Every structure is written in C-alpha cells, then in structure tokens.
Amino acid sequence: MLPALIGSEIFIFKIIGIIFMISTRASTEPSFNLRPPEYYFENPKTISLLDAALTGNTSKAKEWVQKGADPNDEGPMISSYYRLRLLHYAIAAKNPDAVRTLLDVGADPELAALGYGAAFQFAITLDDVTMMKFLLDLRPVPTLSKSILKKMMFHFVIQPRPACLDLLLNRGAPIDCTDNADYTVMMRAMDAKDYDLAHWLVWRGASVKVEAHDGMTPAYSVQSHLNKYKVGSPAYEKVLRLKELMQARGAVFPPQSPEEVRAQWENRRGCENVSALARPAARIHNYPRPNSERLCPTLSRKSSSR
C-alpha cells in the first residue's frame, strides 16, 4: 500500500512539474523553472553523470558513460510535450562547465529534445547570448550541419532574439539560407508580418533578389503587404520603409508576379533545351554586410521593449 501511495505522489509531483515547464515556455519572459535532476531523469546512471557534469568533473563523467550512462538521455518520459536532455539541463542551469563536460563525453548539441528543439535552439529560446557564444566556441558554425543551421535561422521568425541572431550571423551563419520552398528568413519574416526583423535582415545584407520555388520574390511580397494597408497608417509606413530599403539594394519595382517569374523559367528552359531538368536552385545575390556589428535602431528598440 505504501509503495503505491508513494508512487502516486511522485506521479502527481511530475504532472505539476510539467505544468510549470509549459508555463515557463509560454511566458513572454525567457526564463525556465528548472527542477532537480531526479524530476527529469529516472536512470540512476544518468543522474550520476549529470551530477558529475554539473561539478565539472570530466573524469567522473567519463566513468559513468563507460558504465552505461547515456549523455543524450531525455526526460521526463511521462511528458508527451516537453522534455530535456542532459545538455539542455546544463544550459538551463547556466553551467558552462557542465556543457563542456557533456560535450566531451558525447552529448550531441544537434539532437532535439521534445518540445524544445536542439540545444542551440533551447539557448535561443532562453535568449541566453552568453551560452550561445559558449556553444559556438565549442561547436563553430562551419562544423554544424546545414539542418541545424536552418532550424536556428528560421527559429528567429518564431521567437525574435536580435542579439542571438546577430551573434549567429557574426559567426558565419548564412543570412540567406532557405527553407524547403526556397524562402529565405527575411521572406518568412515578412510572411509573419515581422517587418522590423525583415528590415534589419535587409539592412544586414539579406538578398532582395532571391526567387522562391513558387516564383515569389521579396519585391513582390513587400508590394503585396504594402497594398494591404491604408496609406499613412503606421503599418503602411513601416512596410514602405522596407520597400525603400529594398529599392536601394537593387530590388526592381513594380515587381514581377510569381506567375511571370515561373513563365520566365519555362522560357529559359525551352531556349536551353533542358525541359527535363527541374528549375534552377534559388538564385541569391549577396551584398556586403555592414562593418558595424551593432543592431539597427529599429530592431534594437523592438528587442528592448520585449
């Protein structure tokens, strides 16, 4: 009877903990209500490995891995929505020694945790620039997969984190990386009506001459958004400034429609007698980035108001 009662209390405790985890993620503040390791992980070897990492004891951590501890373990398994891996736990604990130790013993920073993404994405969610710098020191951008770079870059459309984005670009992340539809981050920012982010990305050097898989271009997108708003309204003025910046960077107005762009592709393929080939990959014309690494005033004000 007693073991059953204790088990039910632990079950209730974990359910309450999950609610707190979810509430911290839904909050506008980039904070995390971190609980003891025992809440997330059930395997004693995993807990011992994490304890060794949190104290920066690499040799002890290696011993536990040799004994079968998994540096990529995930929990709590009772949760169907949000879980942490050991590396995520170390990041939430703001413990760089633990992060370094876990990476040394085999933790994978690109491995996603349920609901929070990979370790890099988790640091972005927490808006922890210091931890992002540390992670990128240990795992520089050139060593990361294209997949994780894409996930990080498009993560900023969901959760704008100007300082983290600026850091990532300064470390060499491709500003014009595209999703599966050949849309760039700047184009997706416009789709999300985050015109401040789109403006900053163009200011930073994002291409205004990319053509997406469906023929959409930044110029056509910004013109479409401009047409939605009343002349003189705050939203109209914001999009107008974005359009003017695009013009200064070489975008042509009035822009071609996606249908016209696709027709050009077909004509080009016909002329080249390569009708069996798929359309060319997205064509991106890069512009030099500004020497200054500071954020542009528009996005800085937006970030400080969050």
Image (tube, grey):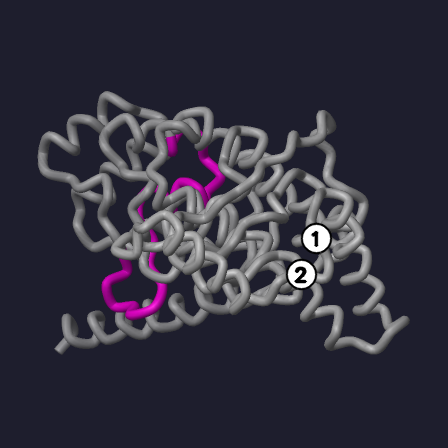
**77 inside magenta stretch:** yes
Q: Which mark is residue 255?
A: 2
Relative vertical location of residue 65 with respect to residue 283 in this rendering, above or below: above
Q: Residue at x 30, y 24 (%)?
A: 57
Q: Which part of the image, by quadrant, shows the C terminus?
A: bottom right
Residue type at mark 2 is Pro
Q: Position of residue 188 (x, y in %)?
A: 55, 60
Q: Are marks 2 and 1 in contact (CB under 8 Å)?
A: yes
Residue at 38% of width from left, 53% of height from top?
269
Residue 232 occupies quadrant:
bottom right
- The residue that appears at 70% across and 44% down in the rendered structure is 250
Is 133 a magenta residue?
A: no
Along the line of sight, the residue nearer the viewer: 260 or 173: 260
Give the labeled residue for mark 1: 252
Would residue 123 be seen by someone viewing this image from the given angle?
A: no
Q: From the top left corner, tell me how far across and down residue 48 is, in percent.
A: 23, 39
The region drawn magenta spans: 75-99
What whole-number distance in Å separates the C-alpha atoms at marks 2 and 1?
A: 6 Å
Residue that extends furthest to the top in the rendered view of this protein: 59
Q: Is residue 91 left or right of residue 166?
A: left
Locate residue 125, reporting x and y percent.
51, 52
Q: Quadrant of residue 148?
A: top left
Inspect the image, locate mark 1, and give the three-letter code of the amino acid beneath it: Val
Q: Nearer the viewer, residue 204 or 267?
A: 267
Please tell me whether mark 1 sits on a helix, a strand or a loop: loop
Vertical position of residue 252 compared to residue 287: above or below: below
Secondary structure type for disc 2? loop
204 lies left or right of 171: right
Residue 202, above or below 288: below
Kindly identify the residue that appears in the image at 78 percent across and 76 percent down. Answer: 229
